[in-house]
Image (spheres, rainbow, N blue to C red):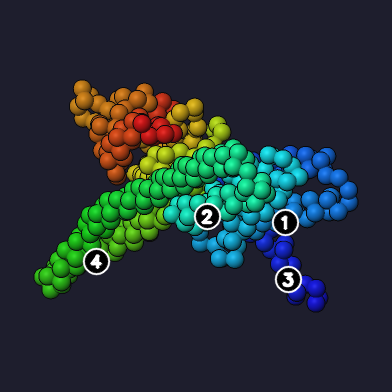
Amino acid sequence: MKFRDMGQPRVLAMVRNAVRDAGRPRVLTLTFWAVYAVMLAGGAVSVRGLPEAALFALVMVLVAGLWLVMPAGRDAAAARRLAAPGLLVVVPFAGQFAGGLHSAMLLIAMVHVAFLYGMRVAVGVVCVYVVAMGAVIVVLSGGDWGVMADQIPLLVLFAIFSLAMAAALIEARTQREAAQRLIERIRELAVAEERARMARDMHDSIGHHLTLIKMGLENAERFRRRRPEAVWEEVGQAKELTVQALAESRRWVRALRPLALDGHVGSGALERLARSFDGTGVEIGFQVEGAERRIDPDSELVLYRVLQEGLTNVLRHAGARRVRARLAYGNDRVALTIGDDGRGAPAPADPAGAPGTEGAAGAADGAGSVVAAGFGLSSLAERVRGLGGAFRAGNADGGGFELHAEVPVVRP
């Protein structure tokens, strides 16, 4: 029990933190370990004698340790960020055993200095590093200006290339983060816009019921002496309207639930929405066809609302016993079909403008009266077409009503 209470060793915790750092480009990680393996193999061949081998092993262990504790973002602890300049100092010692193989690792170290301290600090650190390395070259060469003329310009060019690469990587990461924030913001605005529309519809729907209830009770109050028999008729109608208003409010509470139900998105969110209609007296089935993948947030929200409106309309108008919803993933489009075994939509009085007749063939467009008869289906048809999709609603061949929406995976 005491061993469990002691927790993990600090070194293992640092390794776990290093693995979990998400801001480091994967290419740098792969490059580092590839160069590390090459340096390890080259140094193992070139070292002579046990003391030199021990020193080389110590340097390589230190290089690996600095990499593992080095973070990828500027929000890390100051002690961990010191690993980047520390790597700059240690890598040249490894180069004494592995020749010029350490140059790529120096580049990685300079890039991480820029990641952890910003470009301004990185430029200063690299300038100091180049001057210090120049001084070391002067000392080791015994003041040989020829050696200095060969080495220092190469070191300066290498430093400039490293800083340019760091700036490009930082800009790419900044743009990626900005794009991700923009996508999340667009999704939030889409949900907010949808909720505002639903709030207006809810006001019209429930407000209508409450207005009728108020009028009925006022009539009952007027009739209580002159027509006592009419009082109970008005009260009965008010009671029936109250039941309808309560059922309507429950439907709207269900509709106002967020798109990501309990952390689910995509088909998971749609399936959870379909399951939320259990217990309504209608058997609801949900089926997914094709390989699922992430789709445009606007398309996902529209499909969610199509299923929501379709199931709500079945409960309110269709008189159906069974409903089947099918979500089909294609190459570049996603289709949602909702069909029931109810009585279907009534045929309009004028056959000439008959979306109901077309609907019997399964091809009524969203602009007709069949769509208008469904609560909110006309606005959904406009939204689907606004995304570059297709919308169809009407009576099915085998009876009942069918609703079909098809949207692009990626918004054009």
SS at mark 4? helix
| Residue 148 in sight from this viewpoint | yes
Q: Nearer the viewer, mark 1 or mark 3?
A: 1
In this rendering, position of residue 294 left or right of residue 308: right
Q: Position of residue 405 (x, y in %)?
A: 39, 34
> Closest to the observer: 206 or 61?
61
The residue drawn where x is 12% and y is 73% is: 225
- The residue at which mark 1 appears reads as 62
Q: Nearer the viewer, mark 4 or mark 1?
A: 1
> Closest to the observer: 403 or 304?
304
Say whether disc 3 or disc 4 marks the residue closer to the N-terminus: 3
Give the vertical position of 160 relative to 211 (above or below).
above
Say whether disc 2 or disc 3 marks the residue closer to the N-terminus: 3
Say whether disc 1 or disc 3 marks the residue closer to the N-terminus: 3
Q: Amino acid at mark 4?
A: Val
Q: Which mark is residue 7?
A: 3
- The residue at which mark 2 appears reads as 128
Cα gap from disc 2 to disc 1, whole angstroms: 22 Å
> Closest to the observer: 321 or 252?
252
